[in-house]
């Protein structure tokens, strides 16, 4: 694993902007499969309504998150508290917030 | 994405290792989703994480033609789904008997594997499912015919969008497309079947039904013919048992796996 793809280690390095940029990158790869490569992704973007992603795409995203952040961000545990309707209605911002909180907790040890 | 070659099929798999240590080997539970609008996501967002947390080795995968697995144009007889699952176990190097959880059509696959490969199956857990007997092929033919004629019409999809929401409408349109671009409609009704006396199923079976679904009428049939069977019928519940009654389904299956585990769970 190269230095560029290692998760941020200090609390200060974990910001909403950096995490949003990283997750947007993962989403663009997914969207590219569907030929959608020029969509604006913000904190308010909804996975299903705006990006037309299905629950199976969120499984792929979850695998990407695990690869990027390791066990410090547990997507499966995060969404275990949601029902399927809530998962479908989720925004990118909700996920970014979860990642930021998880990484800060991990950095604090 | 986690894809492995199982037989000749590029298969999307999500495996969750047991999160707690167990005495001996962790039981392996393979989750099989339903037809057309379904994918492994139905388990990934319901039972999967809870089973891993309880000490189970969880295997979830997308069936051929579904989710992010390959979608060949032909080859959708039940026995193809059966051999896909055995090829997947081989590819994952899983040789000991596994528990098969199958939802709807996925349950028919589970029964099919238990009949054709009894040495690979510890128990079958069938959620709202039928064994692949001759009458099942007739009902599948009728259901798939109806689905194809309805789900390929824009007016029907628009109606679904208004009454069931945009998400269901999108899944329904994708299901219609699946029936147009593959031979599923032609293949499933000519699948290999098992005898009506269910003598081919020798492992223990846990069958879970919604009381309001037509499928719960099979309870006396299962209890009369299956060698070892426990049935659970959930009151005021239709076909969507897994999604609408997730907690009860999880508890019933985890208890069952504990009772039948090679290694001890939880």
Image (tube, coloured by chain):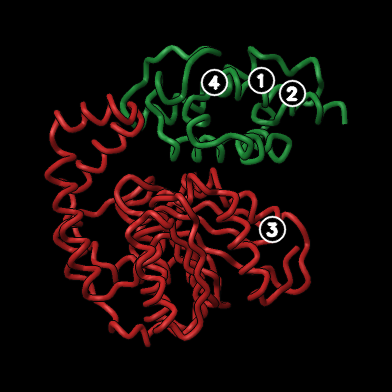
Which residue is label 2 attached to?
A101
**Lower position in the chain sequence, tag 2 or tag 4:** 4
Secondary element under disc 4, as helix, strand or loop, is helix
Q: Is residue B138 left or right of residue A38?
A: left
What's the chain of the residue with tag 3?
Answer: B
Figure quadrant of residue A106: top right
Question: What residue does disc 3 label?
Answer: B18
* Distance (Cα) linking label 1 and label 4: 9 Å
- Residues at badges 1 and 3 in contact (C-beta under 8 Å)? no
- Considering every residue shown, the one lying at the far front of the view is B236
Instruction: Kindly indicate whether the residue at mark 1 contacts the one at mark 2 (C-beta within 8 angstroms).
Output: yes
**N-terminal of the two: label 1 or label 4?**
4
Residue A67 can be seen in this image: no
Which residue has dot 1 on it?
A97
Task: Provide the letter of the chain coloured green.
Answer: A
Are dots 1 and 4 in contact, CB under 8 Å?
no
Using residue A72 as the reference point, say whether residue B103 is left or right of it. left
Residue ID at (17%, 67%)? B138
Q: Residue at x 24, y 66 (%)?
A: B77
Asked if one can make out residue B93 in the rendered structure from this viewpoint, the answer is yes
Depth check: A92 or B101 in front?
B101
Q: How far separated are the C-alphas under marks 2 and 1?
A: 6 Å
Chain letter matching colour red = B
The residue that label 4 is drawn on is A92
């Amino acid at each position: 694993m190269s230095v560029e793809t290692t998760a941020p280690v200090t609390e200060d390095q974990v910001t909403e902007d950096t995490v949003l940029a990283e997750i947007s990158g993962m989403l663009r790869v997914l969207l590219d499969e569907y030929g959608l490569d020029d969509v604006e992704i913000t904190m308010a973007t909804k996975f299903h309504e705006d990006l037309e992603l299905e629950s199976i795409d969120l499984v792929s995203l979850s695998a990407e998150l695990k690869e990027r952040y390791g066990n410090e961000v547990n997507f499966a545990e995060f969404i275990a508290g949601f029902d399927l309707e809530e998962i479908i209605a989720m925004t990118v911002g909700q996920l970014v917030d979860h990642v930021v909180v998880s990484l800060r907790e991990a950095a604090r040890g | 994405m986690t894809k492995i070659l199982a037989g000749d099929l590029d298969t999307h798999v999500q495996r969750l290792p047991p999160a707690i240590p167990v005495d001996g080997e962790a039981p392996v539970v393979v989750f099989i989703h339903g037809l057309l609008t379904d994918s492994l996501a139905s388990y990934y967002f319901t039972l999967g994480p809870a089973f891993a947390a309880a000490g189970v080795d969880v295997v979830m995968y997308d069936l051929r033609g579904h989710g992010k697995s390959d979608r060949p144009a032909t080859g959708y007889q039940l026995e193809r789904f059966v051999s896909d699952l055995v090829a997947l176990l081989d590819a994952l190097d899983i040789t000991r008997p596994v528990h098969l959880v199958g939802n709807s059509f996925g349950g028919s696959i589970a029964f099919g594997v238990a009949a054709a490969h009894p040495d690979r199956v510890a128990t079958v857990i069938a959620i709202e499912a039928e064994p692949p007997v001759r009458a099942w092929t007739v009902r599948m033919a009728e259901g798939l015919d109806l689905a194809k004629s309805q789900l390929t019409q824009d007016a029907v999809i628009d109606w679904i969008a208004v009454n069931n929401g945009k998400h269901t409408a999108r899944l329904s349109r994708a299901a219609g497309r699946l029936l147009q671009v593959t031979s599923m409609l032609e293949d499933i009704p000519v699948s290999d079947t098992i005898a009506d006396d269910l003598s081919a199923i020798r492992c223990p079976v846990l069958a879970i039904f919604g009381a309001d679904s037509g499928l719960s009428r099979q309870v006396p049939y299962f209890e009369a013919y299956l060698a070892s069977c426990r049935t659970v019928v959930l009151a005021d519940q239709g076909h969507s048992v897994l999604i609408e009654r997730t907690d009860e389904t999880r508890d019933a299956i985890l208890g069952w796996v504990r009772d039948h585990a090679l290694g001890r769970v939880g």
